[in-house]
Amino acid sequence: MQPAIPDRFFQLTDQLQASLFPRIDPELRVSRTQLARSIISAQIALLGLWALGLLLFSSLNPEGQIAIDLAGIAFLAGAGAGALWLLRKGSLNKAGYVISLSWFLFVAGSAFLVPENLVFISAAFFLPILVSGAIIGGWAPFVFAFGSIAANSVAVVYANSADVAPGFINPSSLLIYMLVFAVVALSAALISNSLSEQIQRSLSNLHKQADQMAKLAHTDPLTGLSNRRHLFERLESEFARAQRYRRPFCLLYIDMDGFKAVNDQFGHLFGDEILRGSARSMQAVLRATDLLARIGGDEFAVLLAETDIEGAEHVAAKLRKALAAYGSQLSPSLPSLTLSVGVGQISEEDDAIEDILARADKAQYLAKSAGTSLTRTQEDLEPAGQVKQA
């Protein structure tokens, strides 16, 4: 029972880490990285203008004290450079924390160094809250919101003390000021967090819809198999790979013998169910790398990667056996389910997928012409050696 406490501790630690360093969608990461770079670029540009203004002021007013301001500029510029380095390494969350934390520390330091201007300085506490929400998301804006509330509250008490700026805020209004600041800071964090989560959810929904649309575009609605379009896309890809690496692949063209009679005798609804069952039975005996597609009516095709003609004939026999096993479970009055199969294999002379498609189609026609439940290959189309295989 004792290990439960450490396990629970590690679970809480993992949850806290996931909340403070949330996983960012790849597409959202790109836009947030660009946003972070834009923020850093604007920060460095403004710091440059500020430093230039201070130097000009110092030249006109030699007695002016600008050392603290220049130190603050150097601190923010160094933090910006560090954040850019983290962005180049792909550490978006860490870069966001560096940017936000540097501004938080700068504002908090300014609040104690120039307490008489705290009313104006406190407004800058919202900058790290909003920046952390825009770049990091998760709980990050709440971390800076609570930090800002604590720092501002201490700064207000310090600024209102008799030694610094007595009467800075009316004591009767002190609590109200702190509460208003806390409400606004937490509201800013909540809005920033909500916008970040809404964008993340919207992207997730778009990805799901895109996946569904892609699946619909590549799927035969009746059988759930790949359709002709997906088959051709895979053929193009496999053709390019086979041509480059000189690896074999085969294409089976399959036609269910006498299926029209099934439709005529039992109706199209029953015929559709037979097609679905036939598709399941054939899919069950194929490898995960094989692609079974319905290309129309009772015609199917199988793309067999890394397979020669002998292997393709073996696959055709397996498909025929699987279909026969499925048909044996149906009504005895149903005609036997058999396949006519044509086999084509890529050859060195092929210029496009249409070449292997034509040979597979001709081989299937030859198989159907010779009878039922037969397999013919491209070797049956030409004299031996006429087609040079890859």
Image: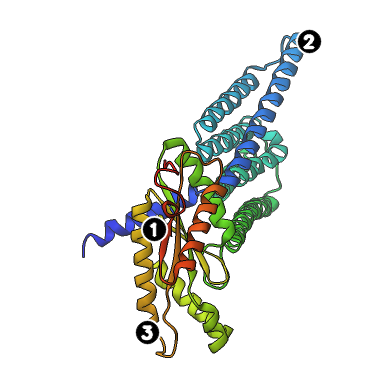
Q: Using the image, determine if residue 175 lies above or below residue 109.
A: below
Q: Which label is found at residue 60?
A: 2
Within 10 angstroms of label 3, few (less than 14), some, or many (20 or more) residues? few
Classify mark 3: helix, strand or loop.
loop
Q: Is residue 334 left or right of residue 176?
A: left
Does residue 138 show up?
A: no
Mark 1 or mark 2: which is in front? 1
Left or right, residue 170 beside residue 91: right
The quadrant of the rendering that contains the C terminus is: top left
For the point 69% across and 18% down, the residue is 51
Instruction: Specify the label residue 124 is tagged with.
Output: none
| Quadrant of the rendered image containing residue 333 | bottom left
Answer whether residue 252 is visible to the viewer in this image.
yes
Disc ID at residue 288: 1
Looking at the rendered structure, the kind of residue marked 1 is Ala
Location of residue 38 by image quarter: top right
Give whichever of 108, 275 is nearer the camera.
275
User: Which residue appears at 40% of the width and 41% of the height?
Assistant: 247
At numbered mark 2, what does the secondary structure look like: helix, strand or loop? helix
Q: Position of residue 115 (x, y in %)?
A: 66, 34
Closer to the chain start, of discs 1 and 2, is 2
**Mark 3 and 1 residues: CB-CB less than 8 Å, in contact?**
no
Nearer to me, 146 or 303? 303
Residue type (three-letter) at the residue carrying disc 2: Leu
- Residue closest to the far right: 60
N-term-proximal mark, 3 vs 1: 1
The Cα–Cα distance between marks 1 and 2, rounded to whole angstroms, is 78 Å
Farthest residue to the front: give it.
383
Please identify the quadrant where the N terminus is shown. Answer: bottom left
> Callout 2 environment at 10 Å: few (<14), some (14 to 19), or many (20+)?
few
Camera-side mark, 3 or 1? 3
